[in-house]
Image: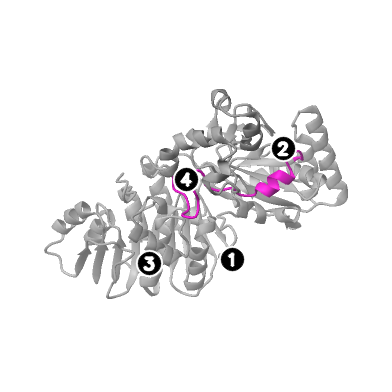
Amino acid sequence: MKEQIAYYPTPIEIVQLMISLSNNKNKNVLEAGFGQGAFFDELINNSEHKTLTGIELDTTFFNEQNNKIKNLNNTFLYNEDYLNHKFNSKFDLIIGNPPYITNDNLHPLIKTKIKELTGSGEGNIYYAFILKSIELLEENGELIYILPYDFFFNTYAKQLREKMIEEGSFELIIDLGDLNIFKNAAPETIIFKWKKNKNKNNIDVYKYINKDSYTNVIPSLTDILKTKILTNTHFEHFTIKHFNESDKIWALSNFNEYKNTQSLSKLAKVGVGIVNGSEEIFKLDNKDILLFSQDEIDIFVRTFIKAKNVQNNTIKEIENNKYLFISKEFKTEKDFFDYPNVWNYLFKNKEVLSKRYISKTSNWWNYLAIRNKLLMDENLDRFKIIVPNMTRKTENWFSITNLPYYIAGDTLMIKGNSKKDTFLLFGILNSQYFNLFYKEKGAKKGKRIIFNQKVLNEINIPKFNTTTNDFIVNEVDNMIKNNNFDFDLINNIIKKELSK
């Protein structure tokens, strides 16, 4: 992989499949970021295109491709940045495998253009590639890309989702799931065909359901697309209603939801954890703590719950999670006057702390992001639900605790509006129904389950009657008292209610 452009070569089987999806391949075609030219070469060999255009920032890749096409008519290459280049025409088909890299690792000029296109300084460069491509398409033009699907739920991709709904429609999405298409890259990939028109027909979804190598799988998928067979040993085919809301998860599932639901936010508040930005400095061992006075320990030392501590529905092994916590109140060096040991500890680590990516309004000793501290302070000794923001576990995602600790940036806290609401949610969230529901309709990257504040606030949970709610609450109460988290009885009552 070339780090500067996050380049992953596209296997020829995928290239051929993607080109076969287009009805516009014989017109004006563009490949944005052509890399080693897999799409470009295939289009040259197999298409009677009117014009074929390619653009690539990497000079080595550009020169290699330019040498191949010197004598070809109606074929144009540009060694420039796609996002800033001004094209003289629009296109009937834009196809390819755009770069994937977060904004933090990009050149400032490219970062500025991404913010202009996406409306956010966060997110991924491929968000901007999609938006730029939409601008460059003719009416009824096609966009066919292979890329990660985190823009289906990522908060920073909201403007992208809005644009895709407003300007056009998906005709087909291939969910490749955990199929390992790219070497040394996480398998979290989709192929989509999006058309610039106002049609909002149902979307054809082809979902990978069986483990195998892509060399065996792709012919199987090609067969489905040609014959319109609904399913085979590798893929399931179904249709879903077109996406119509940019602030909701775009789920590729035909899961039959329970009709009587409510959003989780009706019963609880969700808060993301605190990010320090330098584990190596702020995490303290016993030797470090001995440097501080008791007064300094009381004010500055805090225990944090991290994702690794969320184990089988309870919190474990947190004794060593002691951190030097610098609150927002410490704005100047003078604020540390009465705490010389803390200041000396920070100052000897100034060089490391100063190199962190931190906002311009923050001092070098500040935490990267102190979020939801008030929510944590108000509920330190109350029961709350803790969940990692990303996990590979297939079940038991949610733990419950009343330990008086803060939560770290790799976790989230769910605090019910009452103790009963917290216990009710804990029972529902760990039920078999919610497990299956979230795997189908929630946020994920390959085999990794993703939770964030927005997703949890908006996720739907079943709405039961008072009798069922009380049953769940009592069962959770008994589990906590006995430290035995067996959800069989809760699963049975939920299953019974859902079948009514």
Numbered disc in front, either 2 or 4: 4
How far apart are the alpha carbons under marks 3 and 2?
46 Å
Q: Which residue is mark 4?
A: 364
Pick the quarter of the image with the N terminus. Answer: top left
Q: Which residues are magenta?
A: 356-383
Numbered disc in front, either 4 or 3: 4
Badge 2: how crowded within 10 Å, few (<14), some, or many (20+)? many
Pick whichever of labels 1 and 2 is earlier in the sequence. 1
Residue type for callout 2? Ile
Residue at position x 20%, y 56% from top? 62
- The numbered mark at residue 133 is 3
| 34 within the magenta span | no
Residue type for callout 1? Glu
Q: Which residue is mark 1?
A: 245
Residue 311 shows in this picture: no
The foreground one among 153 and 114 is 114
Residue 186 position, x and y percent, is 43, 43
Q: Secondary structure at mark 1?
A: loop
> Is residue 69 found left or right of 135 in the rendered image?
left
How far apart are the alpha carbons under marks 1 and 3?
21 Å
Residue type for callout 3? Ser
Pick whichever of labels 4 and 3 is earlier in the sequence. 3
Q: Secondary structure at mark 3?
A: helix
Residue type for callout 4? Trp
- The numbered mark at residue 400 is 2
